[in-house]
Amino acid sequence: MAAPDPGVLLRHWGNAYIAYNVASGDTHQLGMLAGDIVEHLLVTHMTQLDLLEMLGSDEAANNAQFCEILESTLTDLANLGLITVRRV
C-alpha cells in the first residue's frame, strides 16, 4: 500500500513534475513516472498492483522489468519523504 506523505505539493510542467515537501522544505524534480505515481496517490491510497494497472498497459503489468522500475521508483519516492510505502 502506498500513500503520499501529508504536506506534499505537486506541480506538473511539461515533461516533469516538481514536488515540494512542506515538512522538510525540500523541493524535488520528478520524471513523468514518479510524478504520475505521486499524483495518483494524492487522490487515493493504492497498492503496487493498482499502480501497475493504472500506469501500465496490460503488457507492462506482466513485464518483470516494468515491475522492477515501479518498485525502484516507489522506493526512491519513499526515501525522498514524498510517499509512505507499507508492505501488506
Image (cartoon, rainbow, N blue to C red):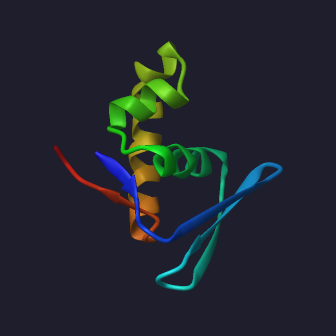
x 78%, y 49%: residue:
15
Q: Which residue is situated farthest in the left direction here? A: 88
Residue 71 position within the rendered picture, expressed as x and y whole percent measured from the top left: 38, 45
x 41%, y 52%: residue:
74
Residue 72 position within the rendered picture, expressed as x and y whole percent measured from the top left: 42, 50
Q: Give above or below for 65 relative to 45.
A: above
Asked whether, in this view, residue 86 is left or right of residue 3, the answer is left
Residue 49 position within the rendered picture, expressed as x and y whole percent measured from the top left: 34, 30
Q: Give above or below for 67 relative to 86.
A: above
x 53%, y 26%: residue:
56
Quadrant in which residue 46 is drawn: top left
Quarter of the image for the C terminus: give it: top left
Count the numbered circles shown.
0
Asked whether, in this view, residue 80 is left or right of residue 84, the answer is right
Residue 78 position within the rendered picture, expressed as x and y whole percent measured from the top left: 39, 63
Of 60 and 29, the residue lying toward us: 29
Quarter of the image for the N terminus: give it: top left
Asked whether, in this view, residue 14 is left or right of residue 78, the answer is right
Of 38 and 28, the residue lying toward us: 38
Q: Which residue is situated farthest in the right direction here? A: 14
Asked whether, in this view, residue 20 is left or right of residue 68, the answer is right
